[in-house]
Amino acid sequence: MRKKIATFTLILFALVFAASLRPVLAQSNSSTNPASIGDPVRSMVELGSVYSNIYDITITVLETVRGKEAMDRLKTASPNNSMPPKGFEYILARVKFEMKGRAITDILTFDLGNAPLQWVALASDLTEYPQISVTVPKPALVGIIKPGDSMEGWVAFAVDRNDSKSVMVFDPDSGGATGRGMTLFFKLY
């Protein structure tokens, strides 16, 4: 009997350990502990004005491109893209955004990438960089996302050339969310 209990305890421990290998939860994500490139971060947004529903989201920065390579890609995307301000350089981030409803009746959509404060770059001292207006490489991370869908695309920022630890922020209070959900932080380096 003791061997069965010991075996059961060992299996239970192994299952708990395996479950801990899932994506990073938003609770451990902060401005001082941003997610690394390639690390998925799970969180939630609350959508709806009268009856709100909670939707699970997962955001992953898949890759970043900086400096000359970012400028070359921006020029390829549109010859009208101008050089960054003096002392600055562009960073492009390819991001994957996934959204799932928690109930079969969850059918609201999320407007991804159209709100100016949805994706923001912060300096290593956490001051906000000014917003920029450039045409990013295709696909851009812009559009309406439905529960069960995912979207992958590019966002762009201009950061100080000497800032080697810039951070990207996702603000869930935009895009149709009703103010619920955590602000998420991601390394751009």
Image (tube, rainbow, N blue to C red):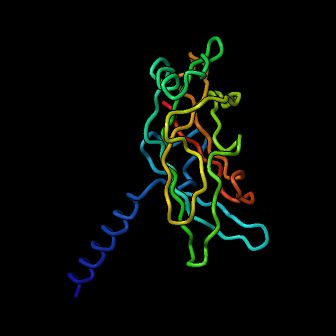
- Look at 61% across and 73% down and name the residue there: 106
- The answer to whether 6 is drawn above or below residue 179 in the figure is below
- The answer to whether 120 is drawn above or below residue 12 in the figure is above
- Look at 49% across and 56% down and name the residue there: 150
From the viewer's perspective, is 12 left or right of 28? left
User: Where, quadrant-wise, is the N terminus in this rendering?
Assistant: bottom left
* Residue 19 figure quarter: bottom left
Q: Residue furthest front?
A: 79
Question: Residue 163: where, in percent of width, then height?
Answer: 57, 21
* Residue 132 figure quarter: top right
- The answer to whether 184 is drawn above or below residue 150 in the figure is above
Question: Residue 86: where, in percent of width, then height?
Answer: 64, 11
- Look at 44% across and 55% down and name the residue there: 23
- Look at 59% across and 31% down and name the residue there: 135
Near-viewer residue (166 or 153): 153
Question: Residue 40: where, in percent of width, then height?
Answer: 46, 50
- The answer to whether 25 is drawn above or below residue 106 in the figure is above
